[in-house]
């Protein structure tokens, strides 16, 4: 890690916003996904209305990775990588160190998946990010069916990878939020 990145990370932690999360809510979360959603929801309350990732620079690096994982999961499960890109999340997922960071959380399957999707995204970025009508957007699914096997793989691993993310968060909770 470069000295610049170390200083940047240190400064970020000095001004990082950590939301408060009720201990009872965490203890009663019925699933790994619900546990993580409690944190994501707390971050979204701190971010600008209507722009959930607007204040990423105010959160710790760990919180940023969690938000990106949550965004990836929500977008891919709802409409695949095409939806993720069309909704403007391509740069946040593919141009950031997200895949490296999530691999450091011992979630290498997601990291590898992101790297494979990144190759498709980068090869066709300008075209994929172009604004479209609903019918043009729908046509992208046929045109870019190379995302489909990646999405199917994501569906197959999502539950186990979410459990790993939850375990990481629980082990490093002070970097994510305050318990009240």
Image (tube, rainbow, N blue to C red):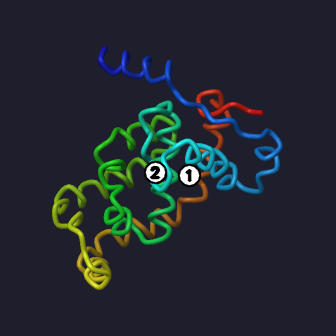
Going by the image, does 35 lie left or right of 71? Answer: right
Residues at discs 1 and 2 in contact (Cβ within 8 Å): yes
Residue 93 higher or lower than 127, as above or below: above
Q: Residue 17, position in %: x, y?
A: 55, 30
* Label placed on residue 161: 1
Q: Residues within 10 Å of mark 2 (few under 14, many from 20)?
A: some
Going by the image, does 91 lie left or right of 9? Answer: left
Q: Residue at x 55, y 48 (%)?
A: 44
Q: Residue at x 26, y 74 (%)?
A: 144
**In the structure shown, which secondary structural element does the residue marked by tag 2 occupy?**
helix
Q: Residue at x 42, y 67 (%)?
A: 151
Report, in whole angstroms, how far the alpha carbon at label 1 lies from the one at label 2: 8 Å
Q: Residue 120, position in %: x, y?
A: 24, 61
* Label placed on residue 85: none
**In the structure shown, which secondary structural element does the residue marked by tag 1 occupy?**
helix
How many numbered discs, if any?
A: 2
Lower sequence index among marks 1 and 2: 2
The image quadrant where one finds the C terminus is: top right
Q: Residue at x 60, y 59 (%)?
A: 159
Q: Residues within 10 Å of mark 1 (few under 14, many from 20)?
A: some
Single out the residue that lies furthest toward the bottom: 135
Tell me the residue that label 2 is attached to.
109
Residue nearest the viewer, comparing 119 with 58: 58
Q: Quadrant of residue 89?
A: bottom left
Going by the image, does 58 lie left or right of 163? Answer: left
Q: Residue 136, position in %: x, y?
A: 25, 81
Residue 68 higher or lower than 148, as above or below: above
The image quadrant where one finds the N terminus is: top left
Residue nearest the viewer, comparing 46 with 101: 46
Q: Residue 106, position in %: x, y?
A: 52, 39
């Amino acid at each position: 890690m470069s000295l610049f990145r170390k200083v940047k990370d240190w400064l970020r932690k000095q001004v990082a916003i950590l939301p408060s999360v009720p201990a009872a809510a965490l203890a009663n979360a019925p699933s790994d996904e619900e546990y993580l959603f409690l944190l994501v929801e707390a971050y979204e309350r701190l971010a600008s209305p209507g722009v959930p990732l607007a204040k990423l620079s105010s959160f710790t690096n760990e919180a940023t990775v969690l938000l990106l994982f949550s965004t990836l999961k929500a977008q891919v499960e709802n409409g695949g990588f095409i939806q993720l890109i069309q909704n403007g999340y391509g740069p946040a997922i593919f141009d950031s160190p997200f895949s490296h960071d999530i691999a450091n959380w011992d979630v290498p399957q997601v990291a590898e998946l992101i790297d494979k999707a990144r190759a498709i995204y980068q090869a066709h970025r300008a075209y994929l990010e172009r604004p479209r009508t609903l019918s043009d957007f729908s046509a992208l699914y046929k045109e870019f069916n190379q995302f489909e096997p990646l999405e199917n793989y994501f569906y197959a691993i999502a539950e186990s990878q979410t459990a790993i993310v939850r375990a990481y968060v629980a082990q490093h909770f002070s970097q994510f939020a305050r318990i009240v």
